[in-house]
Image: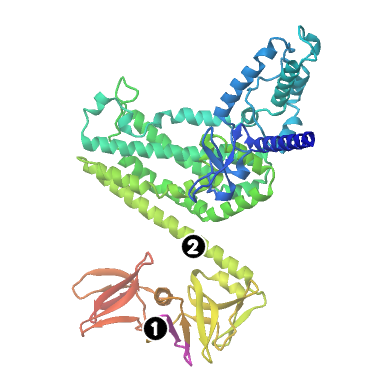
Amino acid sequence: MKEINLKNKEKVRLKEREKEAREREARYSNGHLFTSLTVSSTTLCSSCNRSITAKEALSCPACNVTIHNRCRDSLASCAKMKQRQQKLTLSRNSSALQNVTMRNKTPLMKERPSSAIYPSDSLRQSLLGSRRVRSGLSLAKSVSTNNIAGMSEDSVGLRRILSQSTESLNFRSRTLSLESLTDDGEWWWSPLLEELQEEGSCVQADSWSLVVEPNFLQTLHKDLIKKQDVIYELIQTEFHHVRTLRIMEGVYRRGMLEEVMMEAAVVHTIFPCLDPLLEWHSNFLSELLNRRREGLVEGSANNFTVRSIGDLLLRQFSGQCADDMKKLYSEFCSRHPKAVKLYKEVLTRDRKLQPFIRRACRGPLLRRHGVQECILLVTQRITKYPVIIQRILDNTKGSEEEAQALRQALLLLKELISSVDQEVLELDRTRRLQEIQARLDPRAQADVRGGGVFRGGELLRRRLLYEGALLWKVQGSRMKDVQVLLMSDILVFLQEKDQKFTFASLDKSPVVSLNNLIVRDIANQERGMYLISASTPPEMYELHASSKDGRRTWMSRIQQTALRSVLDSTSWYLFIVSHGTLWYLMVPYSTSWYLIVSHGTAHVSWYCTVPDGTLWCIMVPYSTSWYPL
């Protein structure tokens, strides 16, 4: 009985050891020995830079990295574990190497690192099937038992040593390091990264004060030092932006076209107008670097001062350069949501793209510059210039000409950014109107006051200015959800059903003209408002917003749009106020102006529109004389 119990205990111990060995091997990946870890919600994965939940967190105690469970195979090899295993392998095989003679490697065999890496089964299979590394498989057979002398084959120690040696060689041949695989796969974009690193050597320092020599720094005024620091920051950030564009062009776009073999139209949608953007910013960076070279002190490679930069900035943000910048950023920023959405869809379904992106993002530079990060950085770049130029202006002392050029460049840049924002907004509204029209029932039509018929195709002939959801109160105190479109001259009420839009079929027409439309709030109801149409007979719509602020926004936008629709149909006129001042404004020819506020009997206030489309409220005397242009 005792012998049986001992045998059973021995079997249990063997099973436990085998289980522990399997678990230990399962926790190995790329040389890392991972363990489960409890993390906070702000912990980021060292491989994909995304947040990690507590259930999927793994940590390597050797190199202190924390990753997702699914990212274990994409992480680079553990350097510290590699060193430990090298020492362990040397100590184990020192006695065996004295008696075991191995054949020399073939001349074509590339030297591989001796680090022990434990990849997944799929990666092992792909490595074993590679023609490039197939010659390495013969290493396991290179131990010749005929070369062993001086020891008995029955020796347990010899068998153990031979087992360890051949196992080590087998393992080395079938678990090639990920670094060597990366070297084989990155050869075509490595020169670009090396070139970028070499070009960036002139802007590696954190500030201009750390670039120049201390003796030279002591000879300059404090304000000039601050100005040079900001100018250096402008050059540095512009170089980083050009680097981002070159990575997008030379790594991701080229890889998608040549390696992944994606369609050119899809790649162009992900990276719109990339070439002209790169050309524009490369020219700007070249101008900045030329200005830096012009400021070099004779006989020095590092000491430089850029005395004047306002003329360069003024030239860059005006004229044809400004028009090109406005066009490029309007197109790129307006396509940003579609580009990111398309990239995510392609990344999910394209099996060739996924390994390419994983392989490209292993390096420290590209890890911080993924496709989505690069696209976002490009959209944000134009908003960084005003802050830097303002800081240069604040530290410009003693040169009014330079300060005036900087002020003018800053003003032009702000107008440029405002124009880009407006262009992006208009393109987004146009795209949204096209989406609504596509979801509108083709057979849908609405009766308009006066006997006309309004069809869905007429939406695209107008501009969408604002849209949102409101509640329309109909007969019987019922509330109906409606989607309201504020167009350039009409209001349209739609209802949604089964992902389709139809014109609201309620007790009044779903299309309301803004001409002579009056907007009033409802007493004692902070969310309600009346729309009163001055048609014959007049009609009144009772609408309710989701909040007080929402009602205020709707009332303001409808009033302004209704006023513009009236003023846009009038002629240009010149009027002279009583004290002789000359004004050029857009005013209606007829006397049916929109009276806003009356002040006594001497003056009235009117709304009018100046040539740039801005609404103005002016006060003119009753005695004003009017003259047609």
Range shown magenta: 526-540
Q: Nearer the viewer, residue 367 or 610?
A: 367
319 shown above or below 593: above
Instruction: Say which quarter of the image contains residue 208.
Output: top left
Q: Amino acid at mark 2?
A: Glu
Please give the name of the residue rendered at 32% of the width and 41% of the height, measured from the top-left corner: 311
Instruction: Say which quarter of the image contains residue 142.
Output: top right
Q: Amino acid at mark 1?
A: Asp
Q: Nearer the viewer, residue 223 or 111?
A: 111
| Residue 443 in picture, x, y percent from top left | 67, 77
Whether 535 is among the magenta residues is yes
Which residue is disc 1 drawn over?
A: 521
Q: Are marks 1 and 2 in contact (CB under 8 Å)?
A: no
Whether 486 is among the magenta residues is no
Query: Farthest residue toward the top?
Result: 150
Please give the name of the residue rendered at 65% of the width and 36% of the height, measured from the top-left corner: 24
From this viewpoint, is residue 629 visible?
Answer: no
Which residue is disc 2 drawn over?
A: 426
